């Protein structure tokens, strides 16, 4: 408003109204309230990740039984909630000493095995000799005789290896064990693998090994102990 004297006068605005050009307080944007940040963990992890966990969340989870599985028996001590409550059923169990073959059967096995080996060795030597005579004639030189002896020894060793390693690894028995009703098994009662049977056969070459039945448990020999195998009487099972 202009005064008659020429000065510009300001008329006060009525109550409840805002001056011209002034922004209304309600029109000012309000900043969103900040969410409180969780305290930092001493290990560098966000402590808020575990705020919602309770003792119920950390408890063991019950698992429904399944066919072919059986619960693990408790071995004493505190219960481990994170241990599996089930395990696969196994058909193998440690060989019971009650099923070990007797000393008499072990001796009979040894005797019969040696008889069979000698019979087959004689037959192999006879066949090799006949073949060499057919090839070289009845007269042979010392070199040819040495060749026949070397060849016969090689074939005999190969047969012995097959007789013990092959038959026991595949069938679990030799001809003698088949007659006496005994079988070679692993020390845990399962089938003896090729490695154990091979070690068992090598241990037979230890001097005086057959006399090992006279010491300690007379039903277990050195080649049994060193190879982790046992001979059981299947007629007792």
Image: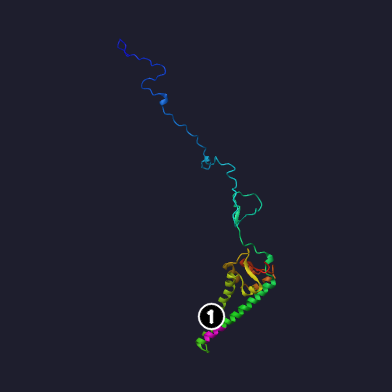
Magenta stretch holds residue 142: no
Q: Is residue 193 above or below residue 25?
A: below
Image quadrant where one finds the C terminus: bottom right
Q: Is residue 178 visible?
A: yes
Q: Residue furthest front?
A: 67
Front residue of this view, candidates 28 and 86: 86
Q: Magenta span: helix, strand or loop, mainly?
A: helix
Start-end of magenta stretch: 126-133
Quadrant of the rendered structure where residue 187 is?
A: bottom right
For image coordinates 68% across by 71% down, the residue present is 213
- Residue 23, percent from left and from top: 39, 24
103 is higher (above) or lower (below) than 17: below
Q: Please state if 48 lies on the left or on the right of 12 as rendered.
A: right
The residue identified by callout 1 is 151
Q: x, y percentage for residue 164? A: 59, 73
Q: Residue at point 54% right, 85% down?
A: 130
Could one spot residue 141 in this view of the protein? no
Q: Residue at x 40, y 23 (%)?
A: 24
SS for callout 1 = helix
Task: Tell whether position 132 is magenta.
Answer: yes
Residue 42, percent across and down?
53, 41
Q: Nearer the viewer, residue 14 or 9?
A: 14
Q: Is residue 181 left or right of residue 149?
A: right
Mark 1 surroundings within 10 Å by alpha-carbon count, few (fewer than 14), some (14 through 19), many (20 or more): some
Q: Quadrant of the N terminus?
A: top left
Numbered marks: total:
1
């Amino acid at each position: 408003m202009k005064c008659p004297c020429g000065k510009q006068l300001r008329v006060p605005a009525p109550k409840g109204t805002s001056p011209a050009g002034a922004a209304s307080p309600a029109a000012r944007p309000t900043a969103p309230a900040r969410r409180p940040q969780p305290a930092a963990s001493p290990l560098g992890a966000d402590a808020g990740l575990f705020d919602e966990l309770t003792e119920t969340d950390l408890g063991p989870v019950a698992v429904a039984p399944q066919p072919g599985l059986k619960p693990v028996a408790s071995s004493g001590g505190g219960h481990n909630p994170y241990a599996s409550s089930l395990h696969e059923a196994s058909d193998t169990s440690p060989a019971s000493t009650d099923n070990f073959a007797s000393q008499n059967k072990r001796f009979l096995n040894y005797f019969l095995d040696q008889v069979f080996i000698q019979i087959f060795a004689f037959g192999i030597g006879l066949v090799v000799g006949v073949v060499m005579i057919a090839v070289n004639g009845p007269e042979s030189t010392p070199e040819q005789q040495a060749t026949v002896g070397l060849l016969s020894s090689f074939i005999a060793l190969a047969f012995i290896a097959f007789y013990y390693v092959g038959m026991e690894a595949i069938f679990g028995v030799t001809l003698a064990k088949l007659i006496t009703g005994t079988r070679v098994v692993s020390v845990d009662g399962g089938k003896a693998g090729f490695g154990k049977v091979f070690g068992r056969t090598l241990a037979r070459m230890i001097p005086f090994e057959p006399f090992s039945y006279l010491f300690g448990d007379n039903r277990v020999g050195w080649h049994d102990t060193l190879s982790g195998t046992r001979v059981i009487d299947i007629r007792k099972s």
